[in-house]
Each structure stands twice: as C-alpha cells, then as structure tokens.
Image (cartoon, helix red, strand yellow):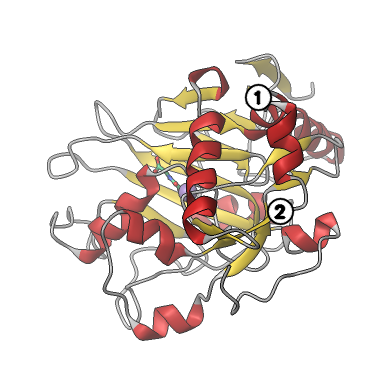
Amino acid sequence: MGISVSPITPDFVAEIGDVDLSRPLAPDDLAAVKQAFWTYAVLIFPEQRLSAEQHLDFARQFGPLEAPSNVGKSGKKLRLRPELADVSNLDHEGSILARENFLTAFQMGNRLWHTDASFRRTPSLCSLLYAQVVPPIGGHTEFADQRAAYDALPEALRRQIQGRVAEHSIFISRGRMGLTEFDPEDLRRLPPVPQALVRTIPQTGRKSLYVAAHAGRIFGMPEAEGRALIDRLIAHATRREFVYTHRWRERDLVMWDNRCTLHRGTAFDDARFKRDLQRATVSDVANSCEQEGIPLPDTRQAG
Ligand code: OGA
Ligand code: MN
C-alpha cells in the first residue's frame, strides 16, 4: 500500500499517513510525498519515531542540509547535533532557559511572521520540524499560504512589487524585537542579502509573495516607504483566510515550503513548560533574485 494523503485544507495543508520516515522510502512513496509537497506546502506526518539521524536522512531527500545559524551560541555547548536547529526553551543540559537569557529573547523572533533563512544568500527550500516535547497549552505554529496571498493581491500592488528586491537580515527581525546588541562575529557571518519580493515556484509555476520579518528596506525606494510596504504586505499575507494553525502532538513531523509560506510560533508559558522541537533545514538551489532572473542589487548601497 502506498502513502495516504488527507487534506486539511483544499490546497495548503495535508496529513500524510501510511508512511514510516525512520526507514528509507520506496521510490514511489518518495515521489508521492514530493508531489503532495508541491501541491500543498505544509505536510504533517503524525506518529513518527525518529532519531536525529533518521530525521536528517529524510530531510536530505529534498536537498543539501543547511547548518543552523546558532546566533549567540559561538563557543557555547549545543544540546543537539550541529545539523539540527534547537527550537526549544532548554539549555544544553535540558533545563528551562531563564527568561532573561539572550537565547530566549533571540528565539522570541520566531513569534514574528517569517520564512526560514531568507537572511541567507541562498535561502531555505524547506524546513522539517519534529516535536519531542510539547507544552499542554499554547506553543502552536501558524502557517500562511503566500501563493494564495499573492493571488489575492490587488492588480496594482502586484504590478508595483513585480521585479522588486528587499534586503533581508536576521538582525532586522531581532531589531524588531528590540534586540540591538549582537556578537560582532555573528554580524560578520550573516550580512544582509537581497531577495525577490515575488517568486515563482518552479514545480507548479505558481507565484508567491516572499516577505518576512527579516526584510527591511526595498531597493530603489526610500527606506521608510520600503519598510511600510513590507509591513503592509505581511499584514495582507497573514490574513486569517491564508492561515493554518498547527497544534502540535508529540512525534509530529511537520515540513513546510519556505519559498511560499510564512510561519510563526505562538506564545506559551515558557517559564513553566518544556517545549522541545528540532528542525532540519534544507537549502534552496539559488538566491531568489537569481531564480527570478532579477539582477542582484549591491547590498552595500542605500536606497
Ligand atoms: C522554526 C520556527 C516556530 C515554532 O522552527 O523555524 O520558526 O513554533 N518555529 O517553534
Ligand atoms: Mn522559523
């Protein structure tokens, strides 16, 4: 028997059953998972029992792994192996982090609408997040369909943003959270990068908005106007009709297409409950401007 696909929404989110991700998938099953992934953009695989290696092996079926950015962790002990992003409120010994810890504040950036690694020149194709421990209430993850958001844009706004490029940086999203003090080595490692505002998903030909809390100015526009436009686009792109809220169960693996979704974590009592999620991240094939055939602007020039 092959995998089963159970849509949660008509064309954005589906649950996948009759599949055991701890073992290599038969070629037909892998092809069916990929087909479902391009049709939907968020797939949920309930009841998976995965070691770190099995989680990473499944992720590798979609492309090369991207190393976590680990901002604020240089020289610090990691709780997980270095290929996995630690999306938890735990320190390296598994205890709940103090609320005033830099890492807690930094992680809080995940509560803003974003797409993973748009702050890297070659951003992420997809993320695969696996839940080990979930809090009894709160701590959900919301996903917004950026293809549907693009389709619903007024024609004049579509024309205004076509071919435009924004600058993305992880320090822009953390700046929005009020964080201003960063390790100079982290700043050097993760310089701002250009990304197209509109992208085309090669597997389906569908157009998608590509914005995020990481986006700051828009090239060729005064800074304030560009930032206002980014905020307006994010507000549009996250209207309730485009959003699915995932309520985690332990052993869920959820994967999403970072090219055409936004996501954010919701609040929970993080001083009281443990939440332990681990993320494998797969790189895209090239920068979004390169994929769209837009010349790369010089990120050192203002305006
Ligand atoms: C992520 C992320 C949100 C959450 O893992 O990339 O943004 O709900 N997670 O933990
Ligand atoms: Mn994220």
Label 1 beta carbon within 8 A of ligand 1? no
Q: Position of residue 51 (x, y in %)?
A: 50, 51
Residue at 51 percent across and 37 percent down: it is 232
In the displayed structure image, the side of residue 25 where residue 79 appears, left or right: left
Disc 2 is placed on an element classified as loop
Q: Position of residue 136 (x, y in %)?
A: 24, 27
**Could one spot residue 285 in this view of the protein?**
no
Q: Alpha-carbon neighbours of circle 2 within 10 Å: few (<14), some, or many (≥20)?
A: some
Which image quadrant for residue 301?
bottom right
Q: Position of residue 176 (x, y in %)?
A: 34, 54
Number of numbered tags placed on the structure image: 2
Marked residue nearer the N-terminal end (1 or 2):
1
Residue at 39 percent across and 33 percent down: it is 250
Residue beneath disc 2: 164
In the displayed structure image, the side of residue 192 where residue 110 appears, left or right: left
In the displayed structure image, the side of residue 49 where residue 19 appears, left or right: right
Q: Amino acid at mark 1?
A: Phe
Q: Nearer the viewer, residue 106 or 181?
A: 181
Instruction: Classify 88 as above or below 18.
Output: below
The quadrant of the picture showing ligand 1 is: top left
Which image quadrant for residue 298?
bottom right
Task: Give how far apart the Cα atoms at labels 1 and 2 are.
Answer: 26 Å
